[in-house]
Image (cartoon, rainbow, N blue to C red):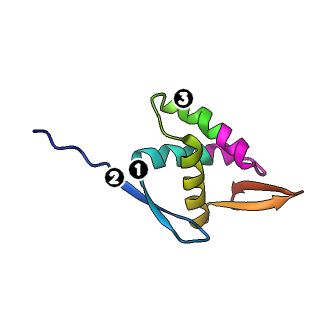
Amino acid sequence: MAKAVKSKKIIVTHPVTGIERKLDADIYAPVKAAILQSLKGSKGKTFNELTDDVVKIIKKKMPRFSGSVPWYTISVRLDLETRGIVETFTEKGNKLNRLTK
């Protein structure tokens, strides 16, 4: 009988609550890369704009991906905020995301 291969897990942390979740590293890495690609050179994007970009990038890189890209986007984005890579700010009443300087 073949053993199931366990995928490596990444612990993601919410910046405000400190709640931790485990995500598959095989999903975390491409979603993180897509977020960074989307925000690179941007002055700020709304969550919807960011999610739309990430969905397009993930569909190209991982056409068979069946999970909720918006759910993974928010989970990974919050972790990147905890790590000081991404920041959230408000401008003209809009909540925006950008890479930290």
Judging by the rendered image, the residue that carries numbered circle 2 is 8
Which label number is shown at residue 60? 3
Mark 1 or mark 3, which is nearer the start of the sequence? 1
Relative to the observer, which residue lies in front, 12 or 29? Answer: 12
Distance from label 3 to label 1 (Cα)? 18 Å
Q: Position of residue 82 (x, y in %)?
A: 58, 66
The type of residue carrying mark 2 is Lys
**Please, is residue 58 above or below residue 88 in the view?**
above
Q: Residues within 10 Å of mark 1 (few under 14, many from 20)?
A: some
At x 59%, y 68%, the residue is 15
> Under tag 1, what secondary structure?
helix
Please identify the quadrant where the C terminus is shown: bottom right
Taking the image as shown, residue 2 lies to the left or right of residue 34, namely left
Distance from label 1 to label 2 (Cα)? 6 Å
Taking the image as shown, residue 15 lies to the left or right of residue 94, namely left
Rendered image quadrant of residue 2: top left
Q: Mark 2 and mark 1 in contact (Cβ < 8 Å)?
A: yes
The type of residue carrying mark 1 is Ala
Mark 2 or mark 1, which is nearer the start of the sequence? 2
Relative to the observer, which residue lies in front, 75 or 25? Answer: 75
Mark 2 or mark 3, which is nearer the start of the sequence? 2
Please identify the quadrant where the N terminus is shown: top left
Taking the image as shown, residue 32 lies to the left or right of residue 91, namely left
Distance from label 3 to label 2 (Cα)? 23 Å
The type of residue carrying mark 3 is Lys
Residue 43 lies in magenta, yes or no? Answer: yes
Q: Residues within 10 Å of mark 3 (few under 14, many from 20)?
A: few
> Under tag 2, what secondary structure?
loop
What segment is highlighted magenta in the picture? 36-52
Judging by the rendered image, the residue that carries numbered circle 1 is 25
Relative to the observer, which residue lies in front, 98 or 75? Answer: 75
Q: Mark 2 and mark 3 in contact (Cβ < 8 Å)?
A: no
